[in-house]
Image (tube, rainbow, N blue to C red):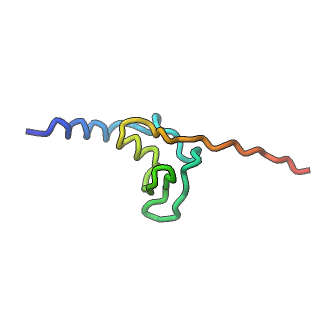
């Protein structure tokens, strides 16, 4: 007999979290690690991953990242 929790876990793996999760590149906590195996990092949560940290958080918790803070927009300077 299979564990009922195992079924739920498998269902969660097939769920598409990309539309629910914020874009890490727009967050102040995101950084590029320059490590080949773990190129994405989150300073707030303190981890590196092969996937976007927001995607990892969404898969693990079932909800979008709650630590997302949007970066300030850069102003464009017109030379002259």
> Which residue occupies 48% across, 59% down?
39
> Camera-side residue: 79 or 27?
27
Q: Quadrant where the N terminus lies?
A: top left
**Going 82% across and 47% down the picture, which residue do you hit?**
77
The answer to whether 59 is drawn above or below residue 47 in the figure is above
Give above or below for 29 relative to 33. above
The x and y percentages for residue 31 are 55, 55
User: Residue 47 location in percent, x, y?
Assistant: 44, 55
For image coordinates 46% across by 34% down, the residue present is 20
Relative placement, left or right, of 11 versus 25 is left
In the picture as drawn, the residue positioned furthest to the bottom comes out as: 35
Residue 55 in the image, given as x and y percentages of width and height? 43, 44
Q: Residue at x 43, y 56 (%)?
A: 50
Q: Quadrant of residue 75?
A: top right
Indicate left or right for 6 with 42 as reference. left
Q: How many marks?
A: 0
Query: In the image as oriented, which residue stretches furthest toward the right?
Result: 80
| Rendering coords of residue 22 (x, y %) | 51, 39
The answer to whether 55 appears left or right of 14 in the picture is: right
Q: Between residues 78 and 72, which one lies in front from this camera angle?
A: 72
């Amino acid at each position: 007999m299979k564990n009922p929790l195992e079924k739920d876990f498998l269902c969660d793996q097939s769920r598409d979290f990309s539309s629910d999760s914020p874009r890490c590149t727009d967050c102040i906590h995101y950084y590029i690690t320059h490590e080949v195996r773990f190129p994405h990092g989150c300073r707030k949560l303190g981890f590196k991953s092969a996937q976007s940290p927001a995607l990892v958080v969404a898969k693990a918790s079932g909800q979008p990242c709650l630590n997302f803070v949007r970066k300030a927009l850069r102003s464009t300077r017109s030379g002259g």
